[in-house]
Image (cartoon, rainbow, N blue to C red):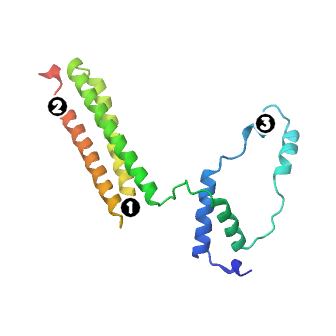
Amino acid sequence: MAGLALSPGSPEINDLAHKVFALALTDDGPDIRQQPSKLFSTRDKFQELRAPEIPSSFAPIPVSEATRSVQSLLKDSTSYPGYNSVERKKEILLDIQSRVLNTQKTLSLTETLYNESGDAYSIRLALDAAAGIVASDVRLLNSVKTSGNAELNKLRVEVMEAVRALDQLVDYIGSTPSPQCL
């Protein structure tokens, strides 16, 4: 029973907590087709059908056994990138970069159509949406920590430059006078 003597902040407990958290994130939950209907069943019938699934008491288990059990469940889950993993950070940075580039293309196309038709409302909506994307991407970009990884640092700098370019495009299009004013 030496496993029960671990302190709450010990690495083993933290490791177990991270693994249980990852399992909870990837759990699909109960199959709703197998559950009794609340709408078409009486309360007693509903409780009767649900009661066998609800445990009434729990036997204490050592932390070491719980850790070993969780590790065996996670043994084959290598496809899930960890919360702070390099792969996950790279995925976030590439997602921001893709969103920024798509927004730049959309905004440039909207500007071209605006210059041809003079539709000030559409360009204003596009500018507001692009400004919102810039703001949210800057917040997300600031939350990604890349210290110590040269590849992530380089990608983060590229993404930040793309976000700045989009912000400058928003400023440029927003300051351009409409054809109706000329």
Give the number of marks. Answer: 3
Residue in the picture at 52% in, 59% down: 82
Q: Mark 3 points at which residue?
A: 38
Q: Which of 37 and 74 is in front in this view?
A: 74
| Circle 2 residues within 10 Å: few <14, some 14–19, many ≥20 | few
Q: Is mark 1 on a helix, strand or loop?
A: loop
Residue in the picture at 67% in, 69% down: 67
Q: What element carries label 2?
A: loop
| Circle 1 residues within 10 Å: few <14, some 14–19, many ≥20 | some
Q: Do the residues labelled 2 and 1 touch (CB within 8 Å)?
A: no
Left or right, 182 with reference to 141:
left
Residue 10: x percent and y percent?
58, 76
Left or right, 169 with reference to 62:
left
Viewer-side label of 2, 1: 1
Q: Name the residue under label 1.
A: 145
Q: Name the residue under label 2.
A: 176
Image quadrant holding the N terminus, namely: bottom right
Quadrant of the rendered image containing residue 155: bottom left
Residue in the picture at 72% in, 71% down: 65
The span from disc 3 to disc 1 (Cα, nearest Å) is: 46 Å
Indicate the amino acid at tag 3. Lys
Indicate the amino acid at tag 1. Lys
Residue 173: x percent and y percent?
21, 33
Q: Which of 30 and 135 is in front in this view?
A: 30
Q: Do the residues labelled 3 and 1 touch (CB within 8 Å)?
A: no
Residue 78's mark? Answer: none
Indicate the amino acid at tag 2. Thr
* Comes first in the chain, label 2 or label 1: 1
Up the image or down, 71 lies above or below 99; here it is: below
Up the image or down, 12 lies above or below 51; here it is: below
Viewer-side label of 3, 1: 1
* Comes first in the chain, label 2 or label 3: 3
